[in-house]
Amino acid sequence: MKLLRLKVDDAFRSLQAGFELEFLQEWDREPVIPSRDLDFAPYILAGPNGSGKSNVLEVLAAIFYHMECMYLENLPDSFVYDEEQNREGYQSKHGIPDAFEVEYRIRVNGQLGSWGIKDYAHVKISKSKGAPPQWLLMNSEVNEGENKLIIDRATARLLLPSYILGYSSGENEVLSLPFFKMRFINYDEYYSRLFNQYDYNGKPEGRMVYLDASFSQAIVICNLLLQDREILKPFSEELGIEDIKSFRITIRRQMGVDQDGEFNTSYSNLDYPEENKTGRILTEYLSHYIDTLRRCATASYQTDESELYLDYLVDDETRKAFRLHFGTALELFQVFQIMLTLNLYTVSSELKKELYTSDSLYVSETVPALASDKRIMRFKHVDLQKHGVKEQVTLKSLSDGAQRLIKTILDSMEHKQGEEG
């Protein structure tokens, strides 16, 4: 996806109603996406502190969060508007901001052939106050000008970004809010499918990902394991990072949860009769992926409390195993993503309902921090090989600047893979 223009017709943070930003002027648009071979070309927002850079990023995150929620098949009951039970719940006709226009180009690979679109669609999303957003196709070869689209869920998701990644280098909770909410939607999707015994394909439906410490570790591991060596050259050239040498994954396999969301470690065995079963093992629908991770491990050990330790000494055979079972770095990351999302299991239904309707900049502070030994999944001892350094260095020991650069490069790789996948 390539952003072209943003207009906000409803005041949002420091952005006044009528704020407009042209990412590309008309005369710059045509050469931007001439082919699939074009190098990744990110935008850079530069300006003094307080000039509104974060607010531009936040409004984009809020807009695409609103659009994503319109077309998700699995939404929690406490999230959706109900006139009697949840008057503050989500409605497509009301958003924050409540009026906007955003234009972008996105690859559709001939899936809009009936409109004469072969490669890239020029999309415009326009929302007026108190009305649902409208979809407009701007480059149809069938009809010139703006073409209003009435679309189903599948087409909408084709026209929305395949992945939306967020990252803040500091304590900028402004940007993280819509991403933070999406994590809970992803958790509730998994939880609902677990208890209703619906199929689950191993990855969340929502496509917004915020890269805090644990998620960033997942992206580093996935890319250094499975990304093409040529693409990883910036790590060697700019940071002296030659490879990933080893890491550990710890998984709690037998955490039990009730139908109402209460967790209880006494469900460790769940050996009572099926007809009396009111709880389930939280990782039950991920057992296949956990077992596959174990097959890829160099060594594994499971305690009596069913805490599983998986150690990886990375070599060519390790990479072959991951490539055989998981395919690409993105596919492996999506498995890690939902497993890390299960670390939200202690958050109550009441708190989630409050969070879904919140616009507070301090919403993450209301969620209790989970001790590392209580997490469903965590990474440890991510060791890297640096050029000219005899001993391995841990990812966490790198400078703050180096870690930011790693995340920036890997975010770009993940973006490109999501666009092409």
Image: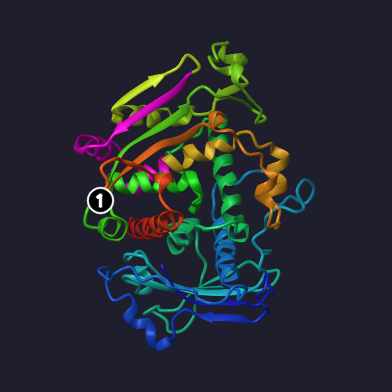
Q: Main secondary structure of the magenta part?
A: helix
Give the labeled residue for mark 1: 387
Residue at x 47%, y 46% (from the top left corner):
215
Q: Give the crowd class for mark 1: few <14, some 14-19, many >=20 residues within 10 Å.
A: few
**Quadrant holding the N terminus:** bottom left
Amino acid type, callout 1? His
The percent coordinates of residue 7 (x first, y second) are: 58, 78
Q: Is residue 258 above or below residue 173?
A: above
Residue at x 69%, y 36% (from the top left corner):
348
Between residue 299 and residue 93, name the one nearer to us.
299
Q: Is residue 366 above or below residue 305?
A: below
Q: Which quadrant of the view contains residue 413?
A: bottom left
| 314 falls in the magenta region | yes
Q: Tell which residue pokes out farthest to the bottom in this image.
A: 27
Q: Can residue 231 be seen?
A: yes
Residue at x 69%, y 72% (from the top left corner):
129
Q: How many marks?
A: 1
Q: Is residue 53 above or below residue 246?
A: below
Q: Is residue 68 left or right of residue 16?
A: left
The percent coordinates of residue 184 (x first, y second) are: 59, 44
Q: Which quadrant of the view contains residue 139?
A: bottom left
Between residue 46 and residue 333, name the one nearer to us.
46
| 395 falls in the magenta region | no
Q: Tell which residue pokes out farthest to the top in this image.
A: 272
**Quadrant holding the C terminus:** bottom left
The percent coordinates of residue 403 (x first, y second) are: 42, 54
Between residue 176 and residue 140, name the one nearer to us.
176
The percent coordinates of residue 40 (x first, y second) are: 33, 68
Q: Is residue 302 above or below residue 114?
A: above
Give the magenta part as a residue range: 306-335
Q: Is residue 315 left or right of residue 134?
A: left
